[in-house]
Image: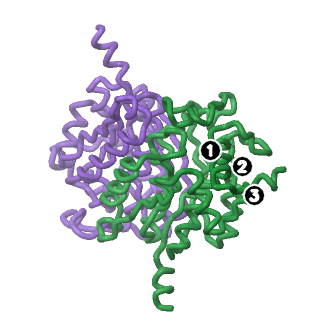
Chain colours: A purple, B green
Amino acid sequence: MIQKLQQKSKKAVVLLSGGLDSSTALYWAQSQGYDCRGLSIDYGQRHRRELLSAKALARKANIEINQIRLDLSWLKVSSLANQKKKLPNLPLSKIGQGPIPSTYVPGRNTVFLSLGLSLADAIGAKAIVIGANALDYSGYPDCRPNYLKAFERVAWLGSKSGVSGTKIKILSPLLNLDKSQIVRLALKLKVPLELTWSCYAGKKFPCGQCDSCKLRAKGFALANATDPALRVYA
Amino acid sequence: MIQKLQQKSKKAVVLLSGGLDSSTALYWAQSQGYDCRGLSIDYGQRHRRELLSAKALARKANIEINQIRLDLSWLKVSSLANQKKKLPNLPLSKIGQGPIPSTYVPGRNTVFLSLGLSLADAIGAKAIVIGANALDYSGYPDCRPNYLKAFERVAWLGSKSGVSGTKIKILSPLLNLDKSQIVRLALKLKVPLELTWSCYAGKKFPCGQCDSCKLRAKGFALANATDPALRVYA
């Protein structure tokens, strides 16, 4: 009981976009005894729809969430933040294998982690949880293990927590899992997958053609599971 | 001539708050041949007045500036972003010597640098310039040399530029200067100091009592110079 209470005081900020990965990361953090605070960011992504999922997930997981708006005009260089650009439509086998795709949002994870760090340092959280994945992913530089390690050093050296002797950890529980392992973990943790949203296209229904839809479908297929979100949008 | 043109293509993002340090950093970067883009952030600082100075400085220096708004409710823990809190009023000799003061804004420089990184990666800038100073300062953790070095690694590993072979540099030309050396450098570079704003208090006139006013006054006194901003507010 005392241990339980102590665990409850272990706070974490979870970067919660509302997708499969970040939702699984949230439920993982809760399973590890973290008292979680969600953080999601409206940066003008074409799939702003995901923010509703993030809210619904936070409600379901019974956590507080901060949703903030970032109006960064220069992000229009990314096809993920510019409706006028075309999303890539690569065959599954090519995703993450070529150059950085047009959906790359300049500095996104650094901005997200820095906002997470600010929140963590303000509320005394000991960890920032991110659903980054370096196996079945689009090949973004800011999802790789050495990048996350480097940010952890920034968090340590640049925060009041760090100076006071608490190194804020960057936890990325999905980093080395492939998509089917993520789906299996999500099912094990009873993540309400029907609430999650992965599609980049930002329409009413998942497009099935963007990197994110394809990787998600691959994950469910290889895990021999049905994506419950498909029932919702069927 | 060709060299001049080549230099002009060397872009830098300058974190421009509108104070003495960041303005001097801007003029320093221009003196080094950088084609500068300003970035300043309204995070609810009580001295939001500084943003007008940043704009005026950008106009004077003939650079483009992005000013963005960050609405982060949790920053109210800082006396710099909460009018209801009292600003510290330390004797000059104690500034930066004790624990981190209440004006510390959680993760501020990490958030600023990450936004600078995002902008730099989007426009192809090769450097981010920050007026951080680790001598005559308030003792914030995110102004120290090893912190800035750590962020440089994040910028390298987490950006498209980095992957493409361009390491975005974090330039902090004032890092090891004391305040009088900064004033001397500003005078040499002809920074329009009458446009700068340093006071934390956010009133019509500089208060003369906050850390920032005291450090600025010390700089001018030791440089045997008169602060031209005082004429403006006299």
Residue A6: x and y in percent read: 32, 15
Displayed quadrant of residue A57: top left
Name the residue at 38% across, 47% down.
B147
Residue B171: x and y in percent read: 44, 61
Residue tagged by mark 1?
A: B215
Amino acid type, mark 3: Pro
Chain ID of residue with mark 2: B
Question: Label 2: how many residues lie within 10 Å, few (<14), some (14-19) or many (20+)?
Answer: many
Chain ID of residue with mark 1: B
Label 3 – label 2 distance at C-alpha: 17 Å
In the rendered view, does A83 fall on the left or right side of B224? left
Point out the tag, 1 or 3, that comes first from the N-terminus.
1
Point out the tag, 1 or 2, that comes first from the N-terminus.
2
Q: Which mark is residue B228?
A: 3
Quarter of the image with the N terminus of chain A is top left
Label 1 – label 2 distance at C-alpha: 19 Å
Residue A61: x and y in percent read: 39, 28
Residue tagged by mark 2?
A: B49
In the rendered view, does A169 fall on the left or right side of B194? left
Name the residue at 43% across, 31% down.
A37
Name the residue at 71% across, 63% down.
B56
Camera-side residue: B96 or B70? B96
